[in-house]
């Protein structure tokens, strides 16, 4: 995207087998966007189920150690090889089950709060905003920002792009809109948190100029239960990202 864009970005866009230039427009949310915004947000979050259950396992040696210990104890107690052979499948199914359940609970919580009442939550005060990215007349992405006055920063939230329109610069265009908002509101710092395990989210934030300033291992996701089984099979890292707006690699005023 190379530093253009705030409201309009020339972008590469796959259309059948042809790549044609298209434009990403980032504009404020309008009530008729709600159903598209909710779909894109929910689909983006549901993609995390697979990543958390399987890709995330490699990042949690403590969970692997726990599963190996359970296997060893199971073997000592039962001496039953076929039972031990089944354990990895049981573990993977349990990880999938708990990831799905907790992400559903997270979505329910979001829909009962901000994402179910977007106009009221984001659009009625100057301290918060939600934007959509539009490509060829279709809503293809969403992002929101909320300023935390007491803490003195703006928070980027709810970033998600329709999977058919990824790698077209939509994420960057949305991110830049949040940085512009923070700057306009007089906030020097933008923060965000993510439990994503896919490289896409991390690379996008790094591309925007954010740096990771902390990781919480064993983060309790909103809506998650803290039962023993949930803690055994759903364990995530929460990455805290931060950007000083004055250090931005993009010149927002040129957009
Ligand atoms: C993360 C997400 C918003 C990125 O949106 P996007 O529109 O594809 O991002 P962009 O096209 O602006 O990409 C910007 C940069 O991010 C990086 N990136 C994006 N997708 C990537 C991928 N799949 N693999 C590696 N890097 C990726 C690249 O550096 C890319 O720049 P480049 O295309 O010039 O190499 C999108 O993948 C998404 O909605 N994912 C599901 C929901 C999610 O994870 N949200 C974030 C939760 S905090």
Image (cartoon, grey):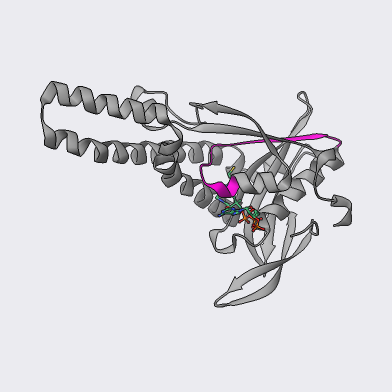
Residue 21 visible in the shown view: yes
Residue 66 coordinates in the image, percent (x, y)? 33, 25
The vertical placement of 246 against 137, above or below, is above
Inspect this view and state whether residue 29 appears.
Answer: no
Above or below, 58 relative to 165 = above
Q: Left or right? Give the position of 164 relative to 93.
A: right
Task: Work out which residue is located at the far right of the displayed protein and give it.
Answer: 253
Q: At which x and y percent is residue 165?
A: 59, 63
- The residue located at (78%, 36%) in the rendering is 127
Task: Residue 25: give x, y in percent of width and height.
Answer: 74, 62
Depth order, front residue of 71/129: 71
User: Residue 116's quadrant in the figure?
Assistant: top right
The structure residue drawn at horizontal position 77% and vertical position 23%, both measured from the top left corner, is: 150
Q: Quadrant of the C terminus?
A: bottom right
Residue 158 placement (x, y as % from top left):
62, 44
Answer with left or right where residue 7 lies relative to residue 72: right
On screen, 226 above or below 200? Answer: above
Q: Nearer the viewer, residue 220 or 19?
A: 19
Q: Is residue 194 magenta?
A: yes
Location of residue 240 by image quarter: top right
- Magenta span includes 221: no
Residue appearing at x 41%, y 32% in the figure: 234
Q: Write the residue at 25% across / 41% down.
A: 89
Q: Is residue 19 left or right of residue 56?
A: right
- For the N terminus, give its image quadrant: bottom right
Residue 108 or 52: which is nearer the viewer? Answer: 52
Q: Quarter-wise, where is residue 33 in the image?
A: bottom right
Taking depth in this image into account, of 3 and 161 the one nearest to the observer is 3
Magenta segment = 186-201
């Amino acid at each position: 995207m190379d530093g253009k864009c705030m409201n309009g970005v020339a972008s590469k866009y796959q259309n059948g087998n042809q790549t044609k230039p298209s434009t990403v427009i980032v504009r404020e949310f309008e009530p008729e966007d709600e159903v598209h915004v909710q779909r894109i947000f929910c689909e983006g979050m549901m993609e995390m189920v697979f990543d958390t259950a399987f890709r995330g396992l490699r990042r949690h040696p403590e969970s692997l150690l726990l599963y190996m210990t359970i296997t060893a104890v199971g073997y000592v107690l039962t001496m039953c090889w076929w039972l031990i052979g089944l354990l990895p499948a049981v573990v993977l199914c349990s990880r999938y089950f708990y990831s799905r359940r907790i992400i559903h609970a997270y979505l329910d919580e979001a829909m009962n709060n901000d994402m179910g009442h977007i106009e009221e939550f984001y659009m009625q005060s100057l301290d918060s905003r939600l934007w959509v990215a539009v490509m060829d007349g279709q809503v293809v992405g969403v992002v929101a920002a909320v300023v935390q006055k007491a803490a003195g920063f703006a928070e980027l939230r709810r970033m998600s792009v329709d999977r058919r329109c990824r790698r077209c610069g939509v994420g960057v265009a949305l991110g830049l809109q949040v940085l512009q908002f923070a700057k306009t509101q007089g906030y020097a710092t933008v923060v965000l948190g993510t439990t994503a395990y896919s490289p896409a989210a991390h690379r996008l934030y790094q591309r925007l100029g954010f740096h990771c300033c902390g990781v919480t291992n064993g983060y309790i996701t909103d809506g998650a239960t803290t039962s023993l089984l949930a803690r055994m099979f759903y364990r995530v890292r929460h990455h805290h990202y931060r950007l000083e707006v004055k250090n931005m690699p993009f010149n927002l005023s040129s957009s």
